[in-house]
Image (tube, rainbow, N blue to C red):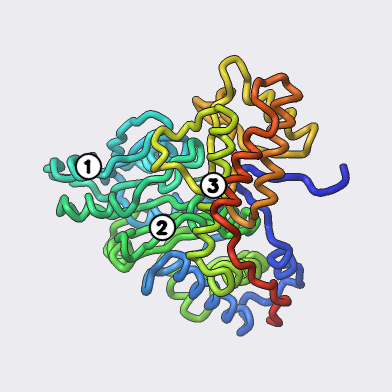
């Protein structure tokens, strides 16, 4: 098919040409001064994205799942208790991973579509009188399977009000660099992320942000047996711009370029505002179609992903297959208990208004082809109105690829 295909899954996301060009180069010596500078630039940029003055970024040739494992094995001892919530595949996944390492997981089941209530966190921490108190609260900031965002500021407030010393461990795989996140302000001890969503890179980097408190826990024997994931050698080697393993050399060139675009050029607040504007239009389209979002409370609706329930009797997997085969439009499927009942629109990363309209137009065509009773144009019009009401942001001229 001519033209480009539409990748609107909730990550991996589309990669800007500039980032692709930055990675299209010969591999360099990862023990050279040039590479040391690259490491430093990536660490400085990541700190800004995390919103931390002195937190330590950790980069692994891995994915978000690897980063989760890295977070856990550095700060939890087998037998440690953690508080977690299950409100989708990835929040539930945090508990599953923790159980595999022999940590004791107190998991609170919620409906898929709900968010974590700060009062519940406060109540559970206040009533934690165990001789083995919670080592951490595990929260997935943006539940990719349902399109629900948790209010981390409120959870931080609840944790502080409880007086409990639990660490705050947060999965930001589908929120970082797209939805406001402030590591220092919200007292987050370990930030878990991957390269392939808001950071506009290919899959392949597992990324952590680690607070001083978490580093101390790890250094004082707080973790589990570990080698590859161990923070101590990474910190030691990073001081010289090196890694204790072979780093993903070319990905780091891409990361530096993406950080320039997000932090130095567009600016993080504008990046967040753009995601909000695109998400508002997608939500308007869903309402225009007369369909409902999986997210129960509109105040918790994600600015990166919208999970949409398909009408009664419509198998979302059939719809997804048709959209992909007929229009080269890839959308996310309903996962876990939502398989067959929902589809997900990814609206994060390198994305603009017209790409969102193209995606919504493709969805309407696919609905129509399959005889799904949704008025053609109803979502598109609602989204166009939403865009025209919010107005357009000032576009930055794209600078030439920096010489590095
Ligand atoms: N956490 C969240 C919120 C995710 O969305 C994902 C993947 O989509 C993961 C964790 C797992 O990350 P990865 O697939 O990079 O291992």
Q: Is residue 222 visible?
A: yes
Quarter of the rendering containing residue 200? bottom right
In this orientation, which residue lies closer to the viewer: 251 or 258?
258
Total marks drawn? 3
Image: 253 above or below 175: below
Disc 2 from disc 3: Cα separation: 24 Å
Residue 114: x and y, percent? 38, 34
Disc 2 from disc 1: Cα separation: 22 Å
The answer to the question of whether label 2 and label 1 lie on touching residues, with beta carbons closer than 8 A, is: no
In this orientation, which residue lies closer to the viewer: 171 or 399?
399
User: Circle 3 is placed at which residue position?
Assistant: 279
Quadrant where the image shows the N terminus: top right
Classify residue 189 as left or right of residue 367. Answer: left
Of mark 2 and mark 1, the one earlier in the sequence is: 1
Q: Which mark is residue 45?
A: none
Residue plotted at (19% across, 40% down): 124
User: Circle 2 is placed at which residue position?
Assistant: 191
């Amino acid at each position: 098919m001519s033209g480009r295909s539409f990748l609107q899954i909730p990550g991996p996301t589309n990669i800007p040409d500039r980032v692709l060009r930055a990675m299209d180069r010969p591999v360099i010596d990862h023990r050279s001064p040039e590479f040391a500078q690259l490491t430093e630039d990536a660490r400085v940029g990541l700190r800004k994205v995390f919103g931390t003055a002195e937190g330590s970024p950790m980069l692994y040739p891995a994915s978000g799942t690897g980063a989760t494992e890295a977070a856990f094995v550095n700060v939890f001892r087998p037998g440690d208790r953690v508080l977690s919530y299950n409100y989708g595949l990835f929040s539930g996944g945090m508990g599953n991973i923790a159980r595999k390492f022999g940590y004791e997981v107190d998991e609170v089941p919620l409906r898929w579509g709900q968010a974590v209530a700060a009062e519940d966190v406060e109540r559970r921490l206040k009533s934690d009188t165990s001789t083995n108190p919670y080592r951490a609260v595990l929260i997935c900031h943006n539940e990719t399977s349902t399109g629900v965002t948790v209010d981390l500021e409120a959870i931080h407030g609840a944790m502080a009000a409880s007086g409990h010393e639990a660490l705050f461990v947060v999965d930001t795989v589908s929120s970082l660099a797209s939805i406001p996140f402030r590591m220092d302000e919200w007292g987050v001890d370990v930030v878990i992320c991957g390269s392939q969503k808001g950071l506009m890179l290919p899959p392949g980097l597992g990324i952590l942000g680690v607070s001083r408190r978490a580093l101390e826990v790890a250094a004082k024997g707080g973790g589990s047996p570990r080698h590859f994931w161990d923070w101590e050698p990474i910190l030691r080697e990073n001081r010289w711009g090196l890694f204790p393993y072979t780093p993903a050399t070319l990905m780091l060139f891409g990361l530096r370029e993406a950080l320039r675009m997000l932090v130095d050029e567009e600016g993080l607040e504008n990046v967040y505002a753009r995601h909000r504007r695109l998400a508002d239009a997608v939500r308007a389209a869903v309402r225009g179609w007369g369909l409902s979002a999986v997210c129960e409370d509109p105040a918790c609706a994600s600015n990166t992903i919208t999970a949409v329930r398909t009408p009664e009797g419509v198998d979302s997997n059939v719809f997804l297959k048709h959209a992909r085969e007929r229009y080269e439009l890839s959308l996310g499927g309903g996962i876990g208990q939502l398989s067959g009942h929902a589809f997900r629109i990814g609206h994060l990363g390198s994305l603009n208004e017209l790409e969102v309209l193209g995606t919504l137009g493709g969805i309407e065509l696919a609905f129509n082809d399959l005889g799904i009773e949704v008025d053609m144009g109803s979502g598109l019009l609602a989204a166009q109105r939403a865009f025209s009401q919010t107005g357009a942001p000032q576009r930055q001229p794209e600078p030439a690829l920096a010489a590095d």
